[in-house]
Amino acid sequence: MKVSAVIWKKKNSDGLYPIRIKLYADRKNKYISTGLAIPLIHWSEKNRRVLKSHPMHERYNTILTNLLESYNSTYTHQDVLEDMASGTLGDLFNERIRDFQSKNRISAVKRYTTIIKHLKELQLILLPLQDINKEHIRLFNQYLINKRKLSSAALKNYNKVLKTSLTYAEDNPRFTLPRVHPYHKFDPIKENGGTKITLKLSDIHTLDESLHFDIKPMSNEFYALTHFLMAFYLMGIRFNDLIRLTWSNLKYNELVYTMSKTGQVMHCYLNDKTLNILKYYLPETVFPRNPEQYTACKNKDGKNIFELEVKYREYRNYINHRELTEQEIKEFQDIIGNRDKLLRLVIEKYSRNRNEFIFSDYFEDATDAQKIYEKISSINAKTNKMLKIIAREKDIKPFSYYSARHTFAHNFRKTTNDLYKVSKALGHSSTTITENYLKAFETLELYEDTDKFYKDMNTLYKV
């Protein structure tokens, strides 16, 4: 195994020549980017180093020396993952994966497995943990930016995983930590932000109306829209948690569930909007949907709800054609209030000691965590596909399931102006996380303000 530094003969977009690490083994060359680039005149082909004529020669040569020593050290170990020496970077990530597998944290397993693939690509999988330094972190980041084209947000998440793994290794006798922590005085990664997709409250109203009056019940569009609206009404609940909800999670006034990402117990108020979505998932023996089911139904409260629903829709039809009188408005409000009060009682009674899933039965018989994860991912993908179709039909900007969480957070912050309440509603472990999460909405608000500015300005023109 031979390791050396070389200057690439092709200029980059800045007109500079990249410096790469050349790995030669089994008659094959592999070149790894260092993230460094210089004018060709400042490179010594004889010494394979940056000349003193370059203003950054000391720093660049230190980086190259550290990288070359690390790769030489790495290849004193065997070149297969299965036979890695104890205490390597690959060892650490494999141990983390085994730990996540034992806890059925499949998404974490997937994330760490992806990182192992990147480390293999960079030939860092056999690097002893005690030898890792800042240059390896920079090399890893350059690879993710230049080759994988990742955003700064994704880059920040990858580095968070690395730092978390190093913290995990502190209490594990298998691993010897570096003398100097590689992230000590390491420049923090700044996110370039961008905007999170959020909808207006008028859009939420349009979608809610569409669910109850336009979309065919139990169709693919219906399921996708109920998922999205429930996420908005339940304080931005994540898809993995929503799809796993059982009836026993529902209490009289609230939903209680354990957030899969953090293990935190969450309490969400069951408002009337959620009740009127949940009613569609009740069996017809509890809540009839048509006259035939109504006749066969023996549940008195369910039949009363059906009767009130019929009257409600009659009044909605009146509203579409004329204004209601004061007496009719009062009657209409009484109908809504009585219907929703009965719904709450019926759902609470039906939910007692029922462990069936509310929104899906696709994995009721599945016991393998990996298969459950794959099924949930498949349902999520189908939901997002249908939401894109609904967005086009309703002339709303394209959105996904996760836009419900963004929309809730953005509007809840504007309403309460209380960071602590927003943080608690989203289930964040600290307000710092919430502050970072909400930063992208600052750009959104700027867009909204500039749009309003130009619209107001257009009123000055007589065109």
Image (spheres, rainbow, N blue to C red):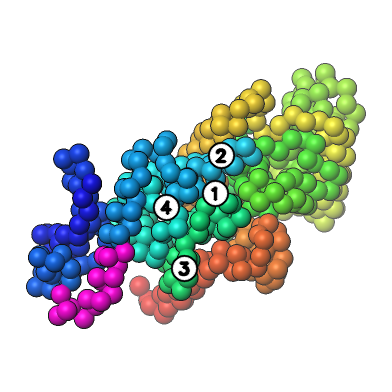
Marks 3 and 4 sit apart, C-alpha to C-alpha, by: 14 Å
> Is tag 2's residue or tag 3's residue first in the polypeptide sequence?
2
Q: Which mark is residue 98?
A: 2
**Which quadrant would residue 304 be assigned to in this image?**
top right
Magenta range is 51-66
> Is tag 1's residue or tag 2's residue first in the polypeptide sequence?
2
Compare residues 392 and 112 and report the one nearer the observer.
112
Residue position marked by numbered label 3 in the rendering: 180
Measured from the top left, where is residue 51 in percent x and y? 15, 75
**Which quadrant would residue 169 be assigned to in this image?**
bottom right
Q: Above or below — where is 14 with respect to 291?
A: below
Residue position marked by numbered label 4 in the rendering: 128
Horizontal side of residue 352 vs 19, given as left or right: right
How many residues crowd around disc 2 within 10 Å: few (fewer than 14), some, or many (20 or more)?
few
How many residues crowd around disc 1 within 10 Å: few (fewer than 14), some, or many (20 or more)?
few
Q: Please, what secondary structure does the residue beneath circle 3 have?
A: loop
Task: Report if the CB atoms under discs 1 and 3 are less than 8 Å apart.
Answer: no
> Is tag 3's residue or tag 4's residue first in the polypeptide sequence?
4
Compare residues 71 and 103 and report the one nearer the observer.
71
Marks 2 and 3 sit apart, C-alpha to C-alpha, by: 27 Å
> Is tag 2's residue or tag 4's residue first in the polypeptide sequence?
2
Measured from the top left, where is residue 178 in percent x and y? 47, 62
Residue kind at label 4, given as amino acid type: Pro
Look at the magenta stretch and give its main secondary structure: helix
- Which one is in front in this view, the residue at disc 2 or the one at disc 4? 4
